[in-house]
Image: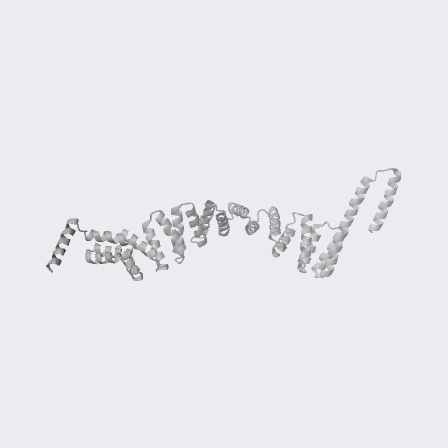
């Protein structure tokens, strides 16, 4: 049929040339006609391919697809359908080639991009996956799941700034899920943007009150921003939720010391003592605070624990002595102070307390005592 058509066109051209008519418009028409004829022929084989594909005669379907493409290779859905068949046949490399061709012919064909993105992702080619994802997102800008995937890939590929912008975009457009808020918070923290990290961590806590991950960021950023009350609030919640993490209590105690919050510092130190019962610094500070607050019964309970662990610790001896002194038991108080003299660190404090009870001799008293001592020796 094509041969007869071309012979007819050749004969027509000869006539036109004899008449002296310009043949360029005619050539254009002939080329267009030839193209249309090729397209019709290609579509015919494409139709055959689809039929064979539907009845699972894959080899014959492949042969028909190849014929169609050989006749005219610029029909995007032929390449897409052929790629889909190659996928079914587990020929993924060839399938990818066809999806690329389909997408080149029609950059707005979403399904070609979708299949291509899956193939890139499966092979670990995440750079190419991201490029295709972004093309897909331009075609479907309301696809929030796709934007989440784009943001996640950017973060994986090291583009934390781009990932953060995408997660913020998701949140600002009403998709502020807990996961998206935490992604934004973590990325901002990674970029040392403490204000942004704090903002989204607090928002995440509104979604999941008491969530440990969000509390950690909220407390950490509050401390970094020197928002002590805020930091203390979230560290406290974290400590109440997890009573076994010593580092949280250490941070909390530092903040309570900074803001001179004795009552809450006592709470934290008591909790700290439970998980580190042999930590003498914690125990000692706790006892001193309880003593300063006039909570003697609780103080002495911990003092006895300290003395059992370290009988020679001067601080506990002094506090024990102070308890006796408060109850009018001066001799017992002196006994404890004198035992504290053996601890060089606390010796000056012990001497001062002893001197308050046993006033030092004046020079006159000392001279008189020496005189009588000499007299006793001479009598002998």
Where, quadrant-wise, is the C terminus in this rendering? bottom left
Q: Which percent across, then down, holds residue 141?
A: 58, 46
Tell me: residue 189, above or below residue 279: above
Q: Is residue 189 visible?
A: yes
Q: Residue at x 81, y 40 (%)?
A: 24
Q: Nearer the viewer, residue 201 or 76?
A: 201
Q: Residue furthest right?
A: 18
For the image, the number of numbered tags is: 0
Q: Quadrant of residue 338?
A: bottom left
Q: Nearer the viewer, residue 127 or 171?
A: 127
264 on left or right of 120 = left
Q: Which percent across, then down, holds residue 166?
A: 54, 47
Q: Residue at x 70, y 59 (%)?
A: 53
Tell me: residue 19, above or below residue 113: above
Q: Is residue 294 visible?
A: no
Q: Which percent across, then down, holds residue 176?
A: 50, 48
Report the colour scheme: one colour
Q: Quadrant of residue 309?
A: bottom left
Q: Nearer the viewer, residue 333 or 257?
A: 333
Q: Which percent across, then down, holds residue 76?
A: 70, 50
320 on left or right of 366 = right
């Amino acid at each position: 049929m094509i041969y007869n058509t071309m012979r007819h066109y050749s004969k027509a051209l000869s006539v036109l040339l004899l008449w002296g008519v310009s043949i360029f418009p005619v050539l254009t028409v002939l080329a267009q006609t030839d193209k249309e004829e090729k397209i019709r022929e290609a579509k015919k084989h494409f139709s055959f391919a689809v039929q064979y594909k539907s009845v699972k005669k894959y080899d014959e379907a492949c042969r028909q697809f190849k014929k169609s493409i050989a006749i005219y290779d610029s029909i995007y859905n032929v390449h897409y359908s052929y790629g889909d068949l190659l996928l079914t046949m587990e020929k993924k490399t060839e399938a990818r080639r066809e999806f690329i061709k389909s997408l080149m012919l029609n950059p707005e064909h979403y399904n070609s991009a979708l299949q291509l993105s899956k193939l890139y992702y499966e092979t670990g080619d995440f750079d190419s996956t991201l490029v295709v994802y972004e093309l897909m997102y331009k075609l479907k800008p309301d696809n929030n799941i796709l934007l989440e995937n784009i943001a996640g890939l950017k973060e994986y590929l090291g583009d934390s700034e781009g990932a953060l912008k995408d997660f913020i975009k998701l949140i600002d457009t009403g998709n502020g899920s807990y996961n998206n808020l935490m992604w934004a918070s973590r990325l901002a923290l990674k970029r040392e943007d403490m204000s942004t990290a704090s903002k989204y961590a607090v928002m995440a806590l509104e979604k999941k009150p008491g969530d440990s991950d969000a509390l950690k960021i909220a407390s950490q950023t509050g401390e970094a921003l020197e928002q002590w009350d805020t930091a203390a609030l979230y560290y406290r919640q974290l400590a109440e939720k997890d009573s076994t993490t010593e580092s949280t209590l250490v941070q909390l105690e530092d903040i309570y010391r900074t803001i001179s919050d004795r009552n809450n510092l006592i709470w934290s130190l008591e909790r700290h003592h439970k998980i580190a019962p042999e930590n003498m610094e914690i125990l000692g500070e706790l006892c001193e605070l309880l003593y300063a607050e006039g909570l003697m019964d609780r103080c002495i309970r911990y003092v006895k624990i300290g003395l059992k662990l370290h009988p020679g610790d001067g601080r506990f001896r002094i506090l024990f002595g102070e308890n006796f002194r408060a109850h009018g038991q001066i001799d017992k108080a002196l006994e404890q102070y004198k035992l504290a003299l053996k601890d060089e660190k606390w010796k000056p404090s012990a001497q001062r307390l002893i001197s308050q009870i046993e006033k030092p001799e004046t020079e006159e008293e000392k001279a008189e005592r020496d005189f009588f001592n000499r007299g006793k020796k001479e009598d002998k």
